[in-house]
Image: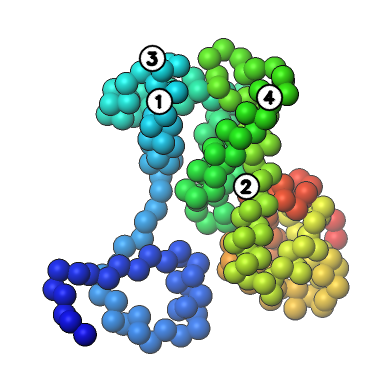
């Protein structure tokens, strides 16, 4: 093998995959001398979205803008985002702005997910085009996207994440997840044991494994934990908002 002094190997792993390797025992981890964890802030994610949007000649022409004027000014990017998209998905004083709403529904149990975020915007474009084609009412003001197009896009994003990531990477967990179809979004050990038809200690073990793969968020106390399903997975499973009754 030829030594290449100018070549450095870089390996990128999701946090959950790294944690799985470490949990199983990974002696070679001691050879890793440099590492960095990539985290995405809300502003970075909005900037990522706007970079992609501003590459569109159609967007540039429609709004009579030059990309360089916006890429150098984050506030301009945010303002343009809320011209292209509605201010809110769910209207109301206590409801979040559109981008926060989207982040809350494309992140898993631990972090924001750029992949699902970009998927949602691509799917929203496809959904909006369908709505134009069948003659549905156009978005208000100068918006190019309606609230409904974004809501419709979320279902597809949810299905892809569930089927192509969770089911594909953790096939043993699929039967347990599928049994939560049309169930409440917050469960206890008792309700999960009933749904899965297993004893409580086994239900706790399965639930904790689902926490490890980011399907569940654990809440409550150690003695009486509650397990909450992130918004990302709810549409695909047609889940019902609320706490299950024991």
53 shown above or below 63: below
The residue carrying mark 1 is 57
Left or right of residue 245, residue 174 in this image: left
Q: Earlier in the sequence, mark 1 or mark 2?
A: 1
140 shown above or below 150: above
The residue carrying mark 4 is 133
The residue carrying mark 3 is 64
88 shown above or below 1: above
Of residues 165 and 189, the one nearer the viewer is: 165
75 shown above or below 170: above
User: Label 2's element?
Assistant: helix
The residue carrying mark 2 is 157
Left or right of residue 194, residue 127 in this image: left
Where is residue 131, by image quadrant? top right
Of the residues tagged 1 and 3, which is closer to the observer? 1
Can the viewer see residue 50 in this picture?
no
User: Label 1, label 3: how many angstroms apart (C-alpha)?
Assistant: 10 Å
Of residues 217 and 70, the one nearer the viewer is: 70
Where is residue 1, by image quadrant? bottom left
Of the residues tagged 1 and 2, which is closer to the observer? 1
User: Which residue shows up at 85% across the image and 60% down it?
Assistant: 246
Of the residues tagged 2 and 4, which is closer to the observer? 4
User: Which residue shows up at 59% across the image and 69% down it?
Assistant: 169
């Amino acid at each position: 093998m030829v030594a290449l002094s100018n070549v450095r190997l870089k390996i990128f792993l999701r946090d959950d995959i790294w944690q799985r390797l470490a949990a199983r025992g990974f002696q070679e981890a001691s050879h890793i001398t440099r590492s960095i964890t990539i985290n995405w802030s809300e502003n970075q994610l909005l900037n990522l979205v706007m970079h992609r949007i501003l590459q569109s000649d159609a967007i540039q022409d429609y709004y009579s803008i030059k990309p360089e004027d916006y890429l150098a000014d984050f506030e301009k990017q945010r303002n343009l985002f809320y011209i292209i998209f509605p201010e809110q998905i769910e209207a109301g004083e206590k409801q979040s702005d559109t981008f926060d709403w989207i982040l809350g529904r494309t992140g898993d149990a631990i972090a924001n997910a750029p992949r699902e975020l970009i998927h949602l915007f691509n799917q929203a474009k496809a959904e909006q085009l369908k709505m134009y084609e069948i003659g549905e009412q156009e978005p208000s003001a100068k918006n190019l996207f309606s609230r409904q197009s974004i809501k419709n896009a979320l279902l597809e994003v949810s299905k892809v994440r569930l089927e192509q990531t969770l089911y594909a990477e953790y096939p043993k967990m699929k039967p347990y997840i599928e049994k939560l179809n049309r169930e409440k979004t917050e469960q206890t050990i008792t309700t999960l044991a009933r749904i899965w038809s297993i004893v409580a200690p086994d239900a706790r073990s399965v639930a904790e494994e689902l926490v490890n793969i980011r399907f569940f968020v654990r809440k409550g106390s150690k003695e009486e934990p509650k397990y909450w399903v992130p918004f990302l997975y709810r549409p695909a499973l047609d889940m019902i908002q609320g706490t299950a009754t024991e």
